[in-house]
Amino acid sequence: MTRRRLVLVLVLLTIVALFFLSGANELLTLANLQAEQARFQAWLAEEPVVVVGGFFVLYVLMAALSLPGATLLTVLGGALFGFGWGLLIISFASTLGATLAALIARTLARAPLEKRFAPQLERINAGIRREGAFYLFTLRLIPLFPFFVINLVVGLTRMRLWTFYWVSQLGMLPGTAVFVNAGRELGNLQSLSDILSPGLVGSFVLIGLFPWLARGLVAIVKRRRLALRHARPTRFDYDIVVIGAGSAGLVASYIAAAVKARVALVERDRLGGDCLNTGCVPSKALIRAARAAAEVREAGRYGIQAGEPRVDFGAVMAHVRRAVRDVEPHDSRERYEGLGVEVLAGEARLDDPWRVRVRAADGERVLTTRHVIVASGASPKVPPLPGLETIEVLTSDNLWQLEALPERLVVLGGGPIGCELGQSFARLGSRVSLVEMGPQLLPREDVDAADLLRQRLVSEGVELWLDTRALRVGPGADDAHVLEVERRLPSGEIEVHRLPFDRLLVAVGRQANVTGLGLEALGVETNADGTLAVDESLQTVLPNVWACGDVAGPFQLTHASAHQAWHATVNALFGELKRFRVSYRALPAVTFTEPEVARVGLSEREARRQGVEFEVTRYSLAELDRAITEGRTEGFVKVLTVPGRDRILGASVVGQGAGELLAEFTLAMTHGIGLNKLLGTVHPYPTWSEAAKATAGLWKNAHKPERLLRWLARYFAWRRGVHRSETRAASTETRRKDA
């Protein structure tokens, strides 16, 4: 038993002892409570207005000021006033208090509440935008958040107070009735044996079952509202129709077929989506070829003289296409049909929430389905830049049709795609200029991580234009083109430059594929970034239409799509019994440049923005034996932890194989493993994975028990026969050096 646990046990035992020694246990006997209740009933009979009015005012004040104890007062009201009067009094008091709390938040506390409850506020605002008063009703009926949070946060929205009042009055009524009834049953106890009476047991069972019953009621109401607008089929061809056969759609289809649901997968282009055909697979094949060229150039540092590599760009692209072909069977039609998925080629459009019209080369077909999962992916975003229409723009979609290596390549965008492809083409021999509007590369990462990548790109000949905005594309000399840009200098002055190029690669992000699906006509809204609006279970405003992958956001990553696909499919098929809220707390992300930049959980920037307190432990790869032997010492491991504890809030790794090293921290965050256990895990020597253990060792050294160590020093000195005065002097000298 640890010291902390021992202290806690002693405190609890002391409290229990004081409870009995003070005689408080005698005040809580059934006879005493019944006597107090009898006196209260007599007072109520004599002065009903005073008693009821006082209780009403007390309840309103507690709710209005968001004080704890409303649930206890609700149960107490049932015991004191009975079910009928208790429900009447508490229902109006709680609603009035909630409305006053919303008014107070709206009038006095907007700024601090917006900061403190930012995640809740965003989710509730999104729900109110989608479904208005009905969303508030569902929050009241099934409290995903404590009622006081709903009061404060909805008070910050633009919902009318009268709407807030009557929806709260109606939505809180069933739950209030359940707790008032439990209080009434408690008030009717005549002896302790009555605790096992059917009425009291049933009341508490109802409290436990109420959230589940309320969730079912809300689902029925949603389906009923939907059925009033559209003609629901009496039978269905499929349990799920999945639109889009990219990463998300394939995983959704696989999971549905694995649990023996009947599933149809509709794809208008190629199975595998962007990841297989134009994204992850071809880009990593290109990166590998480019790294080989860089390794040849750098071979001299290891005593191997190879000279400048000769790059056959046609052969490089053949290697890329070969990699796509070799991975393709994993995502093939034959494989998924073998798993039990019906694969359909064609354009999909929703006629209504249960009917999907598929237009194929051989005609049209209407599929009836209980659920629809939209996994239509995203496409490269092309900005409305003047003059862009006069050239053939390269994107991550059409890049792979290049037959010749561009001599001069301008990359627009300094995010992961722009950095990966820009570095690769520079290594293969292109003169690359990379333009980024922000002050750093990889805007989602911390400055120290982005700065290491910046240094490496500059050393490899990439011309970086940070804090630079593209203005227009125009003609240049010798049939070339120029990109006109303006760059903001540290002094605040603006400089205009003309960057000549043979090809322009646009990598400024991706936009969700939502057009042509019939979703807008059905009332499915999109977010400000163009992704479909979904809740935490990935459900749209239509209760049987779900979305996952790039079309849903917020992370356009293959593994994020698969993560979402599991949640969307399981929630669609089994949501009546159990819903799973998708969590991104331990979602890893890797930029496959050299050095690689990998992160899971919070960065320092995100932690500060969210107001999360943290400690930072940083380990330089220059200290790692394996990095030294390979001459790859650039980079670091940085771990954010809860102050004073080893629980990991986030980890960033920059360096050779950072994406592989990140897996250990992702596992730790997912399963609640702290740095102490990482330190206690044997790692093979010499490996890159030792960096994780070394980082944990640095954290442990910073949190070592100094007092215990001083006592141990005295103990060992005593065992050695050292005089006590010498021990004290040595201890004082040690503390002085530590200081």
Image (tube, helix red, strand yellow):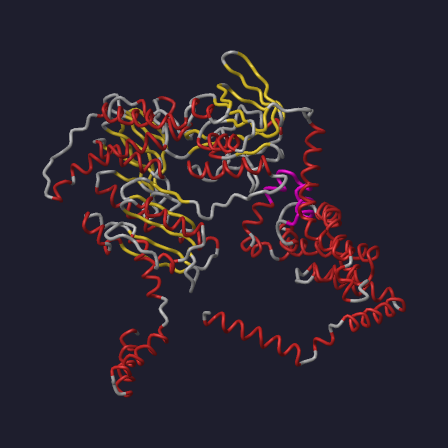
In reply to whether residue 332 is colored magenta, the answer given is no
Magenta highlight: main SS: helix
Residue 472 shown left or right of residue 119 in the figure:
left
Residue 618 shown left or right of residue 558 in the figure:
left
Q: How many numbered marks, from 0 up?
A: 0
**Which of 556/721 is in front?**
721
Q: Is residue 258 above or below residue 31?
A: above
Residue lying at 24% horizontally and 42% vertically, measured from the top left: 458
Q: In x, y percent, where is residue 407? A: 22, 27
Kindly give the residue lying farthest to the top in the view shown. Answer: 362
Q: Choose top left, top right, bottom left or bottom right for residue 542.
A: top right
Q: Is residue 2 above or below residue 66?
A: below
State the quadrant of the C terminus.
bottom left
Q: Choose top left, top right, bottom left or bottom right for residue 90.
A: bottom right
Q: In x, y percent, where is residue 659? A: 33, 44
**Which of 73/693 is in front?**
693
Q: Is residue 583 above or below residue 315?
A: below
Magenta range is: 125-143
Q: Choose top left, top right, bottom left or bottom right for residue 147.
A: bottom right
Q: Is residue 186 above or below residue 474?
A: below
**Which of 440/37 is in front?**
37
Q: In x, y percent, where is residue 70? A: 70, 60
Q: In x, y percent, where is residue 441? A: 34, 43
